[in-house]
Image (cartoon, rainbow, N blue to C red):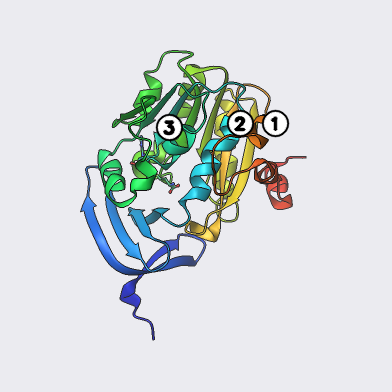
């Protein structure tokens, strides 16, 4: 019989399912000013960060999420120079976007400095680009940061946040997308993690509606596997001021940096829309 105390389990509310990882020991836990953060050393997934009971990042599979939150949108924008990450405190998305030579400025705005300080200790590989001269780490509320920003101050906003509850709730609202729209440049794009296509279709539909009513005419949801998140299948939604019909396929095929999951074929495949998804959203 397995000892249940040696398993971390996240239950998916409403889906009557759960995901568990066997762990060797709990390395750390603390209540920060904003959230309850735990770090486990698992048997087979390396270290695991959990915030308010939800899995965030594991050593073993974070590459899927971080690469798919970064490279598709950066290879879709014609010339991404200024990128902001809202959330993303583990610094994995920051590391990926700094692989793009066109990026001149990458600002990570996470409300909770403790997430980054713990990532530096338990996920040092994700933080290896934090001292890049183009990187700027701020510890403030991303909602306020975007609200206060000047027009035309950024090319891409990546919303790498926790689930829509607690401090991240406002990051899924029309008011926030409107503020993003106002501070983005001409071809500006926002990409946001949009949860599981299997479990959270209602949320995806509401997010897309809020993005369009905030002014974004072009939307694209892409799909990728993510073992440690509910259902093991995840999505990201791009909202853009300009057409999303094409991405910079040649640049993607000739990229001069290493990835573990992303490549030009994965990019194309991630854009394929399942039938149930098209039906739920009334897409052709
Ligand atoms: N990959 C993860 C996922 O989908 O579960 C997200 C990881 S990242 C650690 C999420 C970050 O969002 C946390 O560090 C949290 O502090 C941050 N966050 C939540 N609300 C925020 C807000 N309003 N402004 C800035 N950062 C926020």
Among numbered discs 3 and 1, the one appearing first in the sequence: 3
Mark 2 and mark 3 lie on one chain; the one further toward the N terminus is 2
The part of the image, by quadrant, that contains residue 245 is top right
Q: Position of residue 218 (x, y in %)?
A: 65, 28
Which label number is shown at residue 144?
A: none
Give the residue at the far bottom of this rendering. Answer: 1
The secondary structure type at the circle numbered 3 is strand
Q: Secondary structure at mark 2?
A: loop
* Residue bearing mark 2: 75
Looking at the rendered image, the disc whose residue lies closer to the viewer, 2 or 3, is 2
Is 69 or 162 nearer to us in this picture? 69
Q: Is residue 247 visible?
A: no
CA gap between label 2 and label 1 equals: 9 Å
Q: Image point 67% across, 29% down: which residue?
A: 244
Residue annotated with mark 3: 85
Kindly identify which residue carries mark 1: 250
Q: Is residue 39 above or below residue 9?
A: above
Depth-wise, is mark 3 or mark 1 nearer the camera? 1
> Quick one: label 2, few (<14), some, or many (20+) residues within 10 Å?
many
Is the distance from the Cβ of mark 3 to the nearest ligand 1 atom less than 8 Å? Answer: no
What residue do we see at 46% from left, 65% from top?
19
The Cα atoms of the two marked residues, 2 and 3, are separated by: 16 Å
Q: Quadrant of ligand 1?
A: top left
């Amino acid at each position: 019989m397995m000892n249940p105390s040696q398993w971390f389990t996240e239950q998916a509310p409403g889906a009557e399912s759960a995901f568990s990882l066997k762990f060797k020991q709990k390395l750390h836990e603390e209540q920060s000013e904003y959230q309850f953060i735990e770090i486990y050393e698992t048997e087979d997934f390396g270290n695991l960060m959990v915030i308010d009971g939800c899995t965030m990042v594991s050593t073993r599979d974070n590459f899927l999420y971080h690469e798919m939150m970064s490279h598709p949108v950066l290879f879709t924008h014609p010339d991404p120079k200024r990128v902001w990450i809202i959330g993303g405190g583990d610094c994995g998305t920051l590391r990926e976007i700094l692989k793009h030579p066109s990026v001149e400025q990458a600002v990570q705005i996470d409300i909770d400095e403790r997430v980054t300080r713990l990532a530096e200790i338990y996920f040092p590989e994700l933080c290896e680009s934090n001292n890049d001269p183009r990187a700027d780490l701020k510890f403030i509320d991303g909602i306020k940061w975007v609200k206060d920003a000047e027009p035309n101050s950024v090319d891409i906003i990546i919303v790498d946040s926790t689930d829509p509850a607690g401090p991240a709730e406002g990051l899924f609202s029309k008011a926030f997308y409107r503020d993003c729209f106002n501070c983005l440049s001409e071809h500006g794009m926002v990409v946001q993690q949009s949860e599981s296509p299997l479990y959270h279709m209602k949320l995806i539909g509401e997010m897309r509606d809020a993005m369009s009513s905030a002014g974004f005419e072009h939307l694209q949801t892409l799909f990728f596997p993510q073992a440690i998140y509910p259902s093991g299948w995840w999505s990201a939604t791009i909202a853009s001021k300009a057409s999303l019909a094409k991405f910079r396929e040649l640049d993607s095929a000739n990229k001069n940096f290493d990835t573990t999951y992303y490549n030009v074929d994965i990019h194309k495949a991630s854009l394929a829309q399942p039938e149930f998804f098209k039906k739920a959203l009334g897409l052709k």
